[in-house]
């Protein structure tokens, strides 16, 4: 009966080694969605046992990124009121470097019951062994030398103070079977597996031991992680068996790929969530897009709020094949989210990006008009100010840019003079009236839209691509618009 099923508990367990990778964000998202859909608990554990790679402040930064993305843990490591990392929950500590005595106790228990052994091999011997195996084109793995050491030899080494690690003892010729929630049934023979180090010489655990011990003690029911951990899963299941514990269910997510099908990496573009945040991607859009990397809802719907993702998510719709990261699709999706923002919220979010591009803003009313014009055009907030400087200062441009296609400078100057005379008589300076009246004037004079509007656009913006000249003129105002047209005529005459 469902009444007796354990409550779903998923965890995000990152290492504090720097930025948050898009793949890590997807893992956290899927873990969050699965827990929330099943009314379970999503907690965060920090795996910082590799002290040499830890980056100061990375844990707090990671938590801030998750908060920005809307993925907040129910327990574990979380942000306190001061924006610093703290812990909440009854299964702590949730930071692995604070749990060393727990790992050491369990590692030595395995040695006592014969499921693990002390290994005294030096790094030099292990490197030589690896090179020899590579030369013979054999799998690189430990050869089990220390597994055969007699008790008196082990005692001598301890008495001498020799350094040691603890390795797991792999059962001989045993099939290890499990069902992955994405990939189905998997079977591996123990003969294919290395006898992994569980406890390092410095007393810190490897991922393999820490994962098994922590996910048992923290009552994790489902482990959702990248497919790079799939080869390690049989080792983890053996360890769960050695301890007599029931393992969690596993789901191994497909890789996120570059368009050329290589693994997503910084060499071909941004992979850090922070980069997308800082470029003005909205968290809702990024989460929506990342959810679709490997998961298909089975419908034509592409735009999902976080609550909608919770309702629709299931692992039977997660693909095995790698998911291609398409920046154009993300840009489109982000643009759709930007368009739907209420004006007040858009202005709040976009104003810092405009200030970053043009500097201090003295005329805030003008800035707000500019931003609201850009809201329908941009795919990310950072674009709000990229081509908007002409609103705040007169543009510099080459006079040749004023000439439309096969036209010439004299024709461009003549058309600008006609437009200046026409515009001088307008009292209604709204974009709608400017568009209606000017298009009518151009038609009545037998001009082409391109020949007339191209030099007008360039005279106002100095750009080949910009918002329509009617909207630009409406924001600049009558006096500024006519002044720029006159300067363009002077430049080209």
Image (cartoon, rainbow, N blue to C red):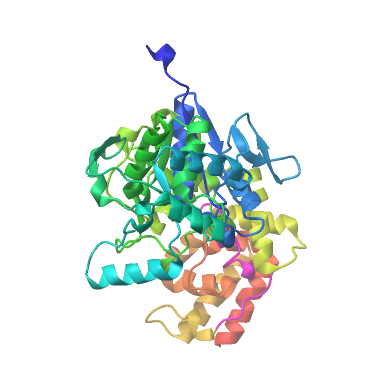
Can residue 323 be spotted in the picture? yes
The number of numbered discs placed on residues in the rendered structure image is 0
Estimate the x, y position of residue 22 in percent, counting from the top left.
Answer: 46, 53
Residue 162 covered by magenta stretch: no
The quarter in which the C terminus is drawn is bottom right
Q: Residue at x 64, y 40 (%)?
A: 78
The residue at the far front in this view is 152
State whether residue 156 is above or below residue 102: below
Instruction: Give the magenta-colored segment's residue range.
Output: 375-397
- Magenta segment, prevailing SS (helix, strand or loop): loop
The residue at the far bottom in this view is 493
Residue 384 covered by magenta stretch: yes
Of residues 116 and 444, which is closer to you in this image? 116
Q: Residue at x 63, y 78 (%)?
A: 486
Q: Name the image quarter holding residue 74.
A: top right
Estimate the x, y position of residue 468 in percent, counting from the top left.
Answer: 51, 62
State whether residue 385 is above or below residue 236: below
Estimate the x, y position of residue 209 in percent, counting from the top left.
Answer: 46, 44
Of residues 213 and 249, which is closer to you in this image? 213
Can residue 336 be spotted in the picture? no
Of residues 168 and 461, which is closer to you in this image? 168
Query: In the shown orientation, is residue 402 left or right of residue 295?
Result: right
State whether residue 334 is above or below residue 467: above
The quarter in which the N terminus is drawn is top left
Q: Residue at x 66, y 75 (%)?
A: 394
Query: In the shown orientation, is residue 182 left or right of residue 363?
Result: left
Estimate the x, y position of residue 45 in percent, counting from the top left.
Answer: 56, 41
Of residues 444 and 453, which is closer to you in this image? 453
């Amino acid at each position: 009966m469902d009444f007796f099923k354990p409550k779903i508990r998923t965890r995000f367990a990152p290492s504090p080694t720097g930025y948050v990778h898009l793949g890590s964000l997807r893992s956290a998202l899927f873990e969050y969605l699965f827990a929330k859909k099943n009314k379970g608990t999503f907690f965060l554990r920090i795996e910082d046992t590799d002290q040499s790679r830890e980056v100061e402040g990375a844990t707090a930064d990671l938590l801030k990124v998750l908060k920005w993305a809307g993925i907040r843990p129910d327990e574990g490591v979380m942000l306190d009121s001061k924006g610093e990392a703290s812990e909440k929950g009854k299964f702590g500590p949730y930071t692995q470097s604070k749990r060393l005595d727990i790992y050491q106790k369990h590692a030595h228990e395995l040695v006592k019951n014969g499921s693990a052994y002390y290994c005294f091999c030096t790094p030099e011997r292990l490197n030589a062994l690896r090179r020899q195996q590579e030369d013979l084109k054999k799998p690189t793995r430990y050869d089990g030398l220390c597994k055969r050491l007699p008790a008196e030899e082990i005692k001598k080494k301890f008495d001498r103070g020799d350094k040691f690690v603890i390795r797991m003892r792999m059962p001989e010729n045993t099939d290890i079977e499990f069902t992955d929630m994405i990939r189905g049934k998997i079977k591996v023979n123990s003969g294919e597996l290395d006898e992994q180090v569980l406890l390092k010489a410095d007393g810190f655990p490897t991922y393999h031991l820490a994962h098994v011990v922590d996910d048992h003690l923290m009552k994790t029911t489902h482990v959702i992680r990248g497919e790079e951990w799939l080869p390690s899963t049989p080792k983890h299941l053996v360890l769960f068996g050695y301890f007599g514990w029931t393992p969690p269910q596993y789901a191994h997510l497909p890789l996120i790929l570059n368009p050329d099908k290589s693994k997503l990496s910084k060499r071909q573009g941004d992979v850090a969530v922070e980069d997308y945040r800082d470029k003005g991607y909205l968290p809702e859009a990024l989460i929506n897009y990342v959810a679709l990397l490997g998961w298909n809802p089975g419908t034509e719907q592409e735009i999902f709020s976080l609550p909608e993702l919770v309702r629709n998510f299931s692992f039977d719709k997660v693909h095995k094949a790698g998911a291609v990261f398409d920046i154009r699709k993300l840009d489109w999706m982000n643009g759709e989210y930007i368009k739907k923002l209420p004006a007040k919220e858009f202005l709040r979010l976009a104003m810092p990006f405009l200030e970053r591009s043009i500097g201090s803003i003295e005329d805030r009313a003008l800035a707000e008009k500019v931003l609201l014009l850009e809201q329908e055009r941009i795919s990310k907030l950072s674009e709000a100010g990229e081509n908007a400087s002409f609103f705040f200062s007169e543009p510099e441009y080459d006079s040749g840019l004023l000439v439309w296609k096969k036209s010439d400078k004299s024709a461009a100057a003549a058309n600008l003079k006609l437009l200046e005379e026409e515009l001088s008589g307008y009292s209604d300076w709204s974009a709608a009236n400017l568009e209606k009246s000017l298009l009518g004037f151009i038609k009545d004079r037998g001009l082409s839209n391109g020949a007339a509007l191209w030099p007008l656009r360039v005279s106002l913006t100095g750009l080949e691509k910009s918002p329509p000249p009617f909207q630009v003129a409406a924001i600049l105002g009558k006096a500024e618009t006519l002044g720029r047209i006159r300067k363009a005529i002077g430049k080209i005459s």
